[in-house]
Image (spheres, grey):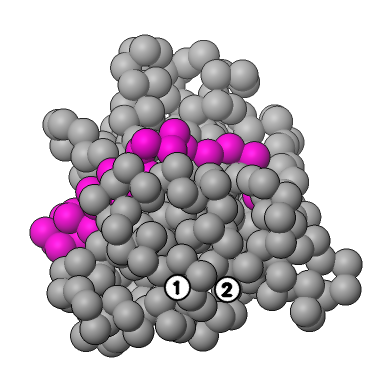
Amino acid sequence: MCHLHLPPKVRVFLWKWESNILPTGVNLSKRIREACDECPFCGLRETQEHILRDCDWAGRIWRPSSLGTLFSEGEEKSSEEWLCDLIDKVSDDELCSMVMALWFLWKERNNKLFNNSKLEESEVIARAEAYLKEFRSGVKSASPARATRQEARWEKLKKDHLKANVDATKMKEGGTGLGLVVRDDEGRLILAAVRRTRVDWEPEMAEAQAVLWDLDLLHIHASQPTLIESDCQSLIQKLDRRGYIETELGVIVKEIKGRCSERGDVRWRFWGRGGNAVAHEMVRANCRWEETEISVGRPPICILNILEKDCNNTLSV
């Protein structure tokens, strides 16, 4: 299976699916006594086969699609048996499409379980196909390009303008951390925030979620013109690009651009890690899972030194 042209994260999913070790309700209940083994959509026992194929929710997604026959032929078979049949019957391209669809089903399961939200059922397969197409075209990299200009420093803006530095990172324990710091034209803190979620976003998606969260907080706490800085170059390139790619990330990018356009005084740019150090440090701040910590006006201790350093070693516009 290692010859399949799939993103690394999807390869990991495929291996877990083939080995029957996806953290479904049933698999978790074998290791954790208190774990719930119920499907988040229908309440039946959540095996791999159930959540990805046999659940009525899954069926409403795959039956109308071009992959419907491949799914129906797998009914009443274990994951391993089903995969062996697919390898024997279909081309590598079809198998990649199938695995990508399964991965998107699994992502939607997690979205429902952890965020109590989900895509329209008619969109899931379409987005899986678009994501695979984008990956094959080379538009999407396995991990976003990051700053190489370590000499970049924090830069002051025009009077009465704000600077919002955002960052996101994968946590060692799993899940994702989001951090952001908003300052005025003199470098004074307007707000700093950190959030930890068990959702395991890819790097670009995590950075996009940080930008979206920043827009939420700006709407509440600030009304001045704002420049959002990120050291995720590939995300900024997508924000700069015209048009819309119908993928999960594309939807978030479209929402960011739309909300910035509505407000009219928010723009974005790529800025190297050296100028984004304060957000990078903020994302590492202690915060409980699925909680948010916001500090308005008073700098958290963890970033005091960086704030002072930025003010003493700054670039002027």
Camera sees residue 255: yes
Q: Amino acid at mark 1?
A: Phe
Q: Is residue 124 inside the magenta stretch? A: yes
Left or right of 67 on screen, residue 299: right
Q: Is residue 199 above or below residue 192?
A: below
Q: Which span of residues is magenta-colored?
A: 113-142
Residue under pointer 2: 22
Q: Is residue 270 above or below residue 268?
A: below
Which percent across, then down, holds residue 162?
46, 26
Q: Are marks 1 and 2 in contact (CB under 8 Å)?
A: yes
Q: Magenta-highlighted stretch: main secondary structure?
A: helix
Q: Quadrant of residue 25?
A: bottom right
Q: Is residue 65 inside the magenta stretch? A: no
Residue under pointer 1: 13
Left or right of 182 on screen, residue 133: left
Give the residue drawn at x 51%, y 70%.
76
Give the residue drawn at x 36%, y 66%.
73
Please report whichever mark, 1 or 2, sits nearer to the chain's N-terminal start: 1
In the rendering, which numbered label is found on residue 309? none
Depth check: give the residue in front, 183 or 132: 132
Q: Quadrant of residue 85?
A: bottom left
- What secondary structure is found at the residue carrying circle 1? helix
Could you tell me how many numbered marks the image carries?
Answer: 2
Q: Residue furthest left?
A: 137
Q: Quadrant of residue 24?
A: bottom right
Distance Cα–Cα, label 1 vs label 2: 8 Å
- Which quarter of the rendered picture does the C terminus lie within? top left
Q: Residues within 10 Å of mark 1 (few under 14, many from 20)?
A: some
Depth check: give the residue in front, 49 or 176: 49
Q: Amino acid at mark 2?
A: Leu
Give the residue drawn at x 72%, y 37%.
295
Which percent across, then down, holds residue 48?
56, 69
